[in-house]
Amino acid sequence: MLSLIKKKILKILKFYLRDIDELKFQIGNSYFSLLNYEITQKARIDDFSYKVFSQNGEDGIIDFLLSTLKISSPKFVEIGVEDYTECNTRYIFQRHNACGLIIDGTKNLLKKVQNNPYYFKKDLRVHNEYISSENIFDILTKQNFISDVDLFSIDIDGIDYWILDSLPVNYFKIVVVEYNPLFSDKEITVPNIKNFDRRKYHFSNLCYGMSLKAAINLLVKKDMIFIGSNDLKNNAFFINKKYLNLFKLNLPSDSEISYFLNFKYKESRDELGKLTYLNKERSLELIKDCKVINLSNSKTEEKKIKDIFDL
């Protein structure tokens, strides 16, 4: 009897959650339809932050970038979407006549994505596999996403650098990539470990991904220009240099990089997985024995955090 009641409650909750998602979507549409980017495109891109389905205002920034490039039917790839309820491409998937590929190792990903009422109306490919620098190119090729990609987003809390490094030059127009602001102004990344898990690499959850400088120096080789970050200071945005003249943004200079490292959030955890809310200094001290790659010297030499930061 209790199990039957639980099933009915879950069914009701799913119905109302779907309605709430639709309301969020429609409010987002109304908001963006009132914007005039021709007038407002004068500041940093974080001024365009607005959250619909993204985690930290990326929806607004992406809408601004696509609108400026006059892309009405975007072709996108997003790696690291969990169940596709809160991520960088869900809004443009629902709003536009988009063609998208999402990739994640989350169990039963396709079944979860099919719960989206827009799924059958759109062209969304779902690839359920843990990504690596070895398999990314084959996956993109098989899914026919190896060229003409308008937007590429990656957030897998791990070997993001090595996956980006595997992609060709001029592969994308817009790139959104997560970076680890705790790595400060150093050019570092975690090693290229298959099935990297930030929780297993260090219990604190703090040693993952790449630094902003690593992302900038890598993507400039792929003809991409850093144009800013989200409000939270953990997602960096890049534009292909061919289209930079279309924007009237105040582009960040090398001397302004510290602005994009001034994060405030606290996500450190103890051995039991409980949040401990450590500040930057104590967080860095906690992971001082973690090994990373110092890219300013080599792509293979592992060094401990404490040796790079002189802790």
Image (cartoon, rainbow, N blue to C red):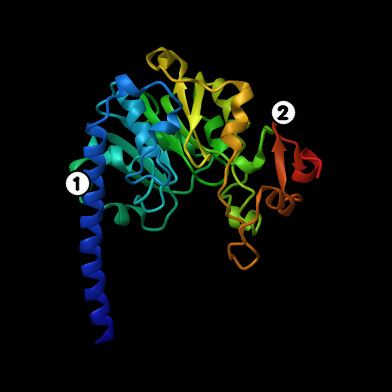
Residue lying at the far bottom of the rendered structure:
1
Residue 108 visible at all: yes
Q: Identify the residue shown where x is 21% and y is 46%.
A: 118
From the top left corner, tell me how far across and down residue 181 is, in percent: 60, 40
* Amino acid marked by disc 1: Phe
In this rendered view, identify the residue nearer to me: 297 or 277.
Answer: 277
State how many labels appear: 2
Viewer-side residue, 112 vs 257: 257
Amino acid bearing label 2: Ser
Please tell me which of labels 2 and 1 falls first in the chain.
1
Residue 239 % position (x, y): 45, 23
Residue 31 drawn above or below residue 167: below
Residue 254 at what x, y percent from top left? 62, 22
- Quadrant (top left/top right/bottom left/bottom right) for the C terminus: top right
Q: Residue under label 2, please give it.
A: 296
Left or right: 203 in relation to 15: right
Residue at horizontal 49 percent and vertical 39 percent from the top: 135
Q: CA distance from mark 2 to mark 1?
A: 47 Å
* Rendered location of residue 227, percent (x, y): 49, 25
Quick one: SS at disc 2?
loop
Near-viewer residue (213 or 119): 213
> What residue sits 63% from the left and 51% below the top?
206
Residue on which disc 1 sits: 120
Q: In the image, which disc is placed on residue 288?
A: none
Q: Residues within 10 Å of mark 1 (few under 14, many from 20)?
A: few
Task: Please rate how many residues cluster around mark 2, counting C-alpha atoms within 10 Å: few if below 14, some from 14 to 19, many from 20.
Answer: few
